[in-house]
Amino acid sequence: MKKFVAIISLVFILSPIILTACWDNRDIEELHIVTGIALDVNKTNDNFIDVTLQITNIQPGDAGKSQSVGNDDKPIIIKKSSKTIGDILKKLNNESNKFIFFHHIEVILFSMDLAKKGINNYIDFFLRDTRSRLEIPVIIVDGRAEDVLRVELQEENQSSIFLADSFQGAKTISKEIHVRLIDAAFKLACKHHCPIIPVVKVEKEMENDKLVDIGFVMFMDSKATTMFAIDDIYGYLFVKDEVHFTDLEIVASETDIVVLKINKLVPSPTVIVQGDKIILEVGINVDANIGEVEGFVELEPKEQLKLFEELLKKDVENRILKTFAIAQENKCDFYGISEMINKKNPRAWARLKDRWKDIFPTVEVKLDVKTAVKSTGQTNQTLEMEKIRNDDR
Amino acid sequence: MMIDKTQISGKRFMFTVAYFIQSSILLTSFTLSLTRQDSWLTVIFSFTLFLPMIWVYRTIMVQFPDKNLIQVLETVFGKFVGKLIGIGFTWFFLNLTTLNLRDLGVFTIITVMTDTPLIVLAIMCMFVAVYSVRKGINVVCRYSAAFTTLQITIIIISIFLVFDQAKFNNFLPIFDQPQLNYLQGVHVMSTIPFGELVVLLMLTPNIRMDKKLVAKYWYIGFAIGGVSFLLVMLREISVLGNLAHLFSLPSLTTFRLIHVGTIFNRIEILFAMALILLLTFKVVFLTYVTVLTIAQIMELENFENLCAVIGLLIVPLVITIYPNSIENQTSGQQVVPFIWMIFEIVLPIFILIVAAVKNLPKQKPKTTPIKQPQKNENN
Amino acid sequence: MLFRFLIRQLFFLKNSHESTKKDEEDKVSEEKKEEELKLTTNMLDNINKLENILKNCTDLRMHQFSFGKDNAINAVIFYFDGMVNFQTSIDSILRPLKDWKGDFTLTQKSKNKKNTENISKENLLNSIKNDAILSPDTKDTNTVSDLIEYLFVGDTVLLINGLEIGFALGTQGWEKRPVEEPLSEVVVRGPREGFTESYKVNTSLLRRKIRNEKLKIEEIIVGRKTKTKIAIVYLEGVADPTVLKKVRYRIGEIKVDSILESSYIEQYIEDAPFSIFPTIGYTEKPDVAAGKILEGRIAIIVDGSPIVLTIPYLFIESMQSSEDYYNRWIYASMTRILRIVGYVVAVFAPAFYIALTTFHHELIPTKLLLTIANSRAGTPFPVFIEALIMIFAFELLREAGIRLPRAVGQAITIVGALIMGDAAVNAGIVGATMVVVVAGTAVAGFMIPTQTEAISILRLLMIFLAAFTGFYGIAMGILLLLAHLASLNSFGVPYLDHITSFKMQDIFMRPPHWAMQKRPEDIARGDMTRREFFIPPKRPETEEEKEKVDKNQGKTKQQLEEE
């Protein structure tokens, strides 16, 4: 009798659980898979932001046939404006037929105007939301951010996937070039350390739209200020972290140009604090190969190599000094020197941090660059040199 | 009088100790918000400061080899006072079970992002717990060795996968926080993950091992657990650095950042599932201890029918114990360590002192402290 | 209707103790009847008694004849047609009786009539036993029921007028299946003998594998109506005596009408009848059974069934197959790991797929997610229902495939596979990925024959849990399963014995034969070493070994002694 009662009561207790709906059960076709999100300042109302979402378009094609991601399908773009992102999402969900699914966002775009007003609140939203991913790139757009989502590219019909892929590829050059959400958040949370975030622009070239990386923008007090060109980023990269596989074009004179492929560049930065004087000492080791040579016809290959090493050394130093000068001009410490001082010598930092804005422009840079050009590729002379040397043929 | 007649071996006990500590790695957020990048120092400090308490536990186990904790209380303090303190311990164990189950449920809801209400997850977990507890300690502790190995493997694999994002200067600066934070951090860390080992004193009659090996098993198990805890803490700080104290679940965030090649991209769910598997053990074990305590106080013959009742009791407790997660965190940092300290540190030392004063245990006429290994039953 | 059925099932649990009452009543009445029927000296009387009991059994044949001097003694033989080998009965009964030159009659006169009768009866009896009947299997009895039992076994019953003792002589000779390769356990390398339905053949197959005096075979008869012979086979000194006692006790406690197959015994004596995991193993090959007996297990042979049970049975045994031991160890370890992985795939693959596509879309890389979304765009059912449909269809195919006549079977399976796979996908009923997943699961499920029932049930359970709460449900299901496995005992030995203990030998890796020197610990007792540990010598040979080989031309001591 006891067993009977126990079993009946168990059935009654468990059946409500089994018979109720499954709360989280969503089939794939009920989702709007968002791949890119763009935030702009609203044209009419300054306080409002526009949020544009790029959603993959999945049409029920020939039933059952497995197609790859439809190459002819253009993505769906939806847009809404309100004061906070949460409000916008609520309105979007009300208006769409499927559930908006954030987990696969590939890129976050902010427009330059919005960046100038400050993006900390919006980064906060993305950190708090459990559905966002922390390693996606954050990109600032020169112009309206939604244009980037609406652009029709040749290579890929969803521009956010294109951007994410290109930034993933850029990671092979250096880890610092790829600003992830968590890196941006990390740096924005520091009071004195200014992050730099890449800038992208839509350009038209012969009837085809292109997305071009035009530079990096500096953030002071969490607001975007000045921008510097993409070529100057190397001065920053050479100090922060290892650089691999990038080409540097060095112009020695009108006719003599050489392109050196950097195999590996390893910096080791240290900060020396002497009272109020701060010296940034960077030791750099460079390994390079010859990529392309124009001119230099009078020199033998051996001498050429030596010359190239000298040229490379000067070039690296110049770049670093130039970018550092830009930082100092704008009083924006994106090199992270404040962090380095804090980590090595917290007491010195406690002394200096109130006057950091004045001290930073006085920081000196001492460089110690050692270069080595290792190989010359498949050939070791150019055709011009061949012509001049063996002019009896 | 043993309520639960099954037995486990000494080595299995050692792995249970290790596993018990490893199951608490979700609780790193308590200390990370206090002592930010020096939390690994806190782990080392509390580990060394807790070693004498392990010796106290081991002495209680050796001096009263076939009495579990409640019986020890009754012997040392007399029946009435002992039962009173036993009821206090019942409240303590019940709370532990509830809190751990709540942690598990909230972890699942945040990671796997279920809209499922907490009660459904709690009922499923308690069902499994009650089913395992009915069969005795052997079923509960059977997989401790395998799961400990699995947990260590997961930690090592995750360290390898995250290695390229780990920056070792995230550990600097050292000793930057105010002094009181360190003290509080050590206090929290020694009561919440390490101090819960007091529940293992309820297992004394069920373990077959020599007196000399008791200390060795305790210390080795504790060392394994402590080392994995330290590794996890190191991993979190080196990857998340500055932001570690912002997140409510730093382990999950570390897993989310794993991005090696194209395959190991979004595997935090797999890790979450492995963690769920491994954390449920703690809930099951604590349920077993709660049921055993209550059965011991009421001196029941067997506890199989009691299991389901206790299971049903714990489920509504899980939902109502804290209204939100902020209260959970503040209570965990400010209130709970002091209460737990009474049960985990003060009372065992008190037991030893009173036992020494009263000169217990009395020498028994027959010498049965070392159990004969039972053939053919359990391993 | 369903409701009534459920109520009846629940009442079974309540009234389960009532069904054993009937057994005892039957037994008492049976015992009473047995006592009444004894043989008398009058042969006609006995014949009548026999024929009364065996009324309407037209295959019972009777042959009356007389033998002795002047054909004075009347006798009758009974046998069941078809069960008796005529040649044997002629050679062992009829011819020797006809040739018997006994001089005894029962009508000799003497002073003490009774004495003489007794003496002469005894002399007649002795003489017939010693001189006349030439069968190595002679039994005599004086109860009719015993005679009937012997008739059922295939013996010929001889009744002699004037003797109140009947003889039963072994003359079995019925049609039986020859020893051939069993269809269910096919190996590439290894012996191809298989047990048959005949009890004698089975015991002889085992005897020929283990030629040791410690191999004991104990016989028990079970089943009121079928009177099946059951043998308990074990190696004395190695098998565990407590398990042996339990087995004997439990078989003795079986009080049923019929034992038609060894699985009846299995289901009566097993440790956990409500569990989906078998705690008693079975095999159809004598080399497998012999291997298990040598490790300390106990085998049970049931007459009429080619399947031999082995006790105790642990979980890890379902992952081991006899071919593991006949192949070399590296490859054998690889196949074993493959089998274990296949088991996991068979149980969890559809559940993982469902959990991934309905709950955890974030685990799938973006491009793959878009591909799956495209391929599922037109299908009407949610993934859960699709999985159930496909698995149901697969189980239909499997069950039908067993019963199809062999000629048609091939065609139907191909058509079935084509229909299930291709056409369903093209018609848009199921998605293509689901077909792949279910096909993989199905094939993986066949890798382990003893666990197919457990795998099918577990697979369904996991699918339900996954559809309910995704990975959390699967995790809870795994824990429930592990807790259940941990609590199972097979005759006192824990079910997961070697996997979670600290002495793992032969679980994930099959160690080389020369490394496994001890028998598994919890199963064997007593004689624990199976071989001397030696590492096979390095080849090419060292100097020492060359010397040993050259000395005495490589012959061992034993061979030298023989010469």
Image (spheres, grey):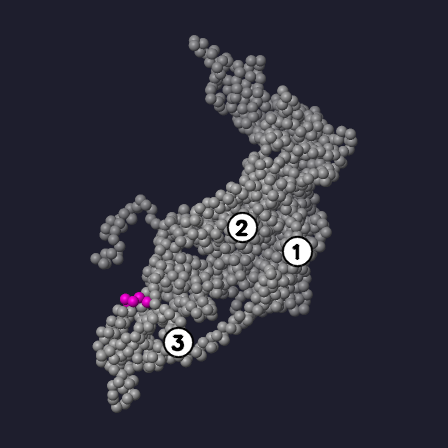
Pointer 3 chain: C
Residue that carries the numbered disc 1 in the rendered image? A16
Instruction: Please say if A201 is above or below B289.
Output: above
Which amino acid does the dot numbered 3 rest on?
Answer: Asn
Residue B287 forms part of the magenta stretch: no
- Between B236 and A322, the one lying in front of the other is B236
Whether residue B48 appears in this view of the structure is no
Please report the bounds of the magenta region as a residue range: C84-88
Question: In the image, what residue occupies the spot 43% across and 69% down?
Answer: C225
* Few, some or many residues within 10 Å of mark 2 (<14, 14–19, 20+): few
Pointer 2 chain: C
Instruction: Please say if B124 is above or below A152.
Output: below
Mark number, residue C396: none
Whether residue B80 appears in this view of the structure is yes
* Few, some or many residues within 10 Å of mark 1 (<14, 14–19, 20+): few
Label 3 sits on a secondary structure element that is helix
Residue that carries the numbered disc 2 in the rendered image? C392
Mark number, residue C52: 3
Label 1 sits on a secondary structure element that is helix
- Between C288 and B48, the one lying in front of the other is C288
Question: In the image, what residue occupies the spot 30% across and 81% down?
Answer: C162
Tag 2 and tag 3 share a subunit: yes
Which amino acid does the dot numbered 2 rest on?
Answer: Phe
- The image quarter containing residue A30 is top right
The reply to whether dot 2 and dot 3 touch (C-beta < 8 Å) is: no
Of labels 2 and 3, earlier in sequence is 3
Q: Residue C243: horizontal and vertical position, in percent? A: 45, 65
Prevalent SS, magenta region: helix
